[in-house]
Amino acid sequence: MLFDTHVHLNARQFMVDREEVIRRATSNGVHYMTVVGFDEETIPLAIEIAESYETIYAAVGWHPVDAIDYNEEHLKWLEELSTHPKVVALGEMGLDYHWKTSPKEVQEKVFREQIRLAKRVQMPIIIHNREATKDIIRILQEEEAETIGGVMHCFSGTLSDVQPCLDMNFYISIAGPVTFKNAHELKEIAKIVPLDRLLIETDAPYLAPHPYRGKRNEPAYVSLVAKQIAELREMDYEQLCQVTTENAMRFFQIKEK
């Protein structure tokens, strides 16, 4: 039984065949999923999908790429949504220095406000990081994010970045790139993350694992991530599935269904 902890079934790429994609995931052992909403368009749909399926949940937050469009009304909206019975985390939030749509100082302000919201409502956070690892760790430390904990979604830091995240009560989530031949450091990270802090995800429709690299990703492919990590850690695939699902249930505070 697998748990895809970060998937965008609310993306436009799934508008035509979402139900079929969910059926394929289920038939591949993916019993649980968390659909992540990150702007005005994707948040309502994430909740709608979660309401429609018993074992699909939602996370809501504001993406750093769109930080320039964020205002106080959005913060109030996220706080209201945090009480929804199917919302299990706040995010994704963080910093993105690859795309230049939102100035760094605006991204940081929006990031800090969401961390503080999460602390008020006592919910874990999902971190988006692109080319901003050091600043993200610094902000999390300054905001004392260890009091709520979270997950470093689609981990893209270095080996030396793992321990500071663990020290802040964060999980490390690994996605499709771990299957890429040139992902040497990520493979090493997959070996050394403590088993009780490891999560897996697809980030579908993005970052499809080998042999689907470059194509649309989907939650069924999280099994390929699990198989690669099991091989790297020289452990039984079924055990890896069980442990990462238990970790996700604990992280999102979900009771088994």
Image (cartoon, rainbow, N blue to C red):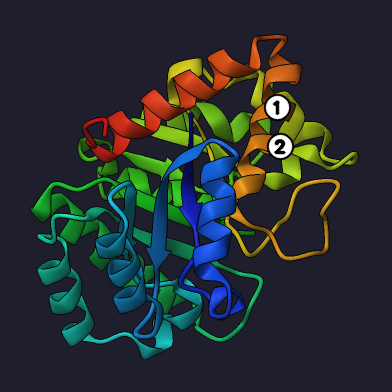
Left/right placement of residue 124 relative to residue 10 reads left
Residue 80, image x and y in percent? 10, 70
Residue 54, image x and y in percent? 28, 50
Q: Nearer the viewer, residue 3 or 233?
A: 3
Quadrant of residue 145 in the image? top left
Q: Which residue is mark 1?
A: 227
**Which residue is pictured at 73% across the width and 55% down the height?**
208
- Is residue 189 among the parts visible in the rendering? no
Mark 2 belongs to which amino acid? Leu
Say the numbered circle drawn on residue 224: 2
How would you rate the neighbour count of disc 1 (Cα within 10 Å): few for under 14, some for 14-19, many for 20 or more? some
Q: Are marks 2 and 1 in contact (CB under 8 Å)?
A: yes
Q: Nearer the viewer, residue 255 or 122?
A: 255
Residue 161, image x and y in percent? 57, 35
**Which residue is pictured at 26% across the width and 34% down the height?**
257
Q: Real-space Cα distance between discs 2 and 1?
A: 5 Å
